[in-house]
Structures are given as C-alpha cells and as structure tokens.
Amino acid sequence: MQEASTPPVSMYRALIIFGLGLVSAAAVLVGLAFLIGGEYGLLVIPVVVLVVSALAYVALKGGRRRRSLLPAIIPALLVLFFTLPSVGFAFGHFDSVFDFGPTVLGVLGGLTTLLGVVVAFVTESGGRAANATTPTHWRAFTGVAAALGAICVLSAILTIAGRESVSAEEREGATVVRMKQLEFEPEVLEVGTGEIRIVLENDDPTVHTFTIDELDVDEDVNGGSEALIEFEAPAAGSYEITCEVPGHEAMTGTIEVR
C-alpha cells in the first residue's frame, strides 16, 4: 500500500513493474534449474537479470523523468534473447516446468515491459498527465500473476508425475547413454551390427533429445526421466547425435557402427 506522500504510479509504469516481476520469476526458475543441474557457472545469467530488474524497479519508483524508464529495457531484452527462440519447443512441453515456465514468463514479461516503456515514454514526452494506477489495475495484475503461477504449478505437477524409468529387465543388454550438462556420455558410442538398444538417462531438469537425422531417430527425454530406444544398425560408418532443443546446439555426439 502506498504512503500518502508518495506520488501515485502511472498506469504504464505499473505495467513495466508487472513485466519486470514476470522477468524476475523467469530468472528464478532458470536459476533453480541451473542449481538442480549442477551448472553453477551459468548462475551468473539469472543473477544479472535479477539485479538489473531490481535496479530498474528502483529507477521507476524513484524517478519521474523519462530516462528513469530506460533501465527496464535491459532485463527485458536479455530475457527475450534467451527465451524467444524456445517458444515453440516450450509450448510443446507443458510437462517440463523448467522448459515451459521460464519461456512463458520470460516472453510475456519481456514484451510487457517493452510495451510499457514505449507507451510511457511517448505519453510522458507529450507532457500529458498519465493515468494513475487504480486498485482495479492492481487487482488485474494480481489476477494475471496468480493465473500464470497456477499454470506453472500445474506444469510442475505434470513434470513430477510424468517421470519415466526403464526397468532392470529392459536394461539388460542395452547401452546406457547419460545426458548431463549439455553433454552425451559417452560422447562416442560404438556399436556392432544387428539391433541397437540404448537406455537414455536424462540427469538434467530440462528436456533433451537424442536425435540421429540420418537414421530417423528422434527421442525426447524429460528431465529426470529415462527412455529405451531400439533400432536396427545401419551400414558401417559414423553418424552424428544431436540434441534438437533450442540453445543446445553444442550438445553433440557420435555413434560408430562397426
């Protein structure tokens, strides 16, 4: 609740603050995924987004000049840079909260923030008095945030409930390939002729794929899950293994057929 001496926040500045809140929530989810996956070096990315978002919030609340709007652009562009390429993939994986949640919150938050900055900048440049935020506006923001939170909670429930494992009987005679921190282990998989059976273990909290385009093999494995794939060995040679998740282009391996 605002104190009586505090000037009311304009509707467009409130929209920016709401967008920054979504951006921050996306950064928290990404940071949590990095912590679970043991990728501590990458924590700097969500931390930077959170710090810049906090500084942008302070500038918005403490200033009334147009230049106080500009810091909000930085976290919005950062989060959009990382999330926009994953929109299609994320919406197809609602049962993976660490893929779905950060992307949806990040894209909505980034676009909302930029929209608020543009409209506020234009409005305030004309010298017109911006409409003050009313309790109705705040209730609307709260309702949207609650709905998005509920969607993410449902995604998390489906993520946990949908984890799959491969039985000991199915594992017998199969080669195990671990997917961890954007790497296939082993990176080079040597197989002979006949039927190939591979158990995929995804030790990360996000989805990975085991894709061999030349062999028409493409298996999605949710975070914390396992999957068994079977296919006939092709002609002798080397075949590239990739992960087709956006941003995972560096995750590659090779299958050597002897």
Image (cartoon, rainbow, N blue to C red):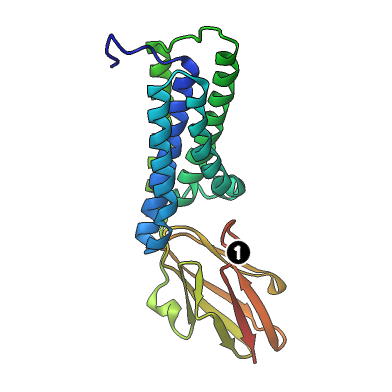
From the viewer's side, name the closer residue of 254 and 84: 84
Residue at (41, 39) in percent of width and height: 24
Residue at (47, 45) in percent of width and height: 102
Q: Is residue 158 visible?
A: no
Residue at (51, 25) in percent of width and height: 67
| Position of residue 146 measured from the top left corner of the image (x, y, whole percent) | 38, 29
Quarter location, residue 229? bottom right
From the viewer's side, name the closer residue of 18 and 120: 120
| Position of residue 216 measured from the top left corner of the image (x, y, whole percent) | 69, 70
> Could you classify mark 1 by the number of other residues whose Cα lies within 10 Å: few (under 14), some (14-19), or many (20 or more)?
few
Q: Is residue 211 visible?
A: yes
Question: What residue does disc 1 label?
Answer: 249
Q: Look at the image and tell me in which quarter the N terminus lies.
A: top left
Residue at (49, 33) in percent of width and height: 71
Is residue 42 toward the left or the right of residue 244 in the image?
left
Is residue 231 toward the left or the right of residue 14 in the image?
right
Give the answer, above or below, for where 97 lies relative to 233.
above
| Position of residue 118 measured from the top left corner of the image (x, y, whole percent) | 59, 24
Give the answer, above or below, for where 133 lies relative to 182.
above
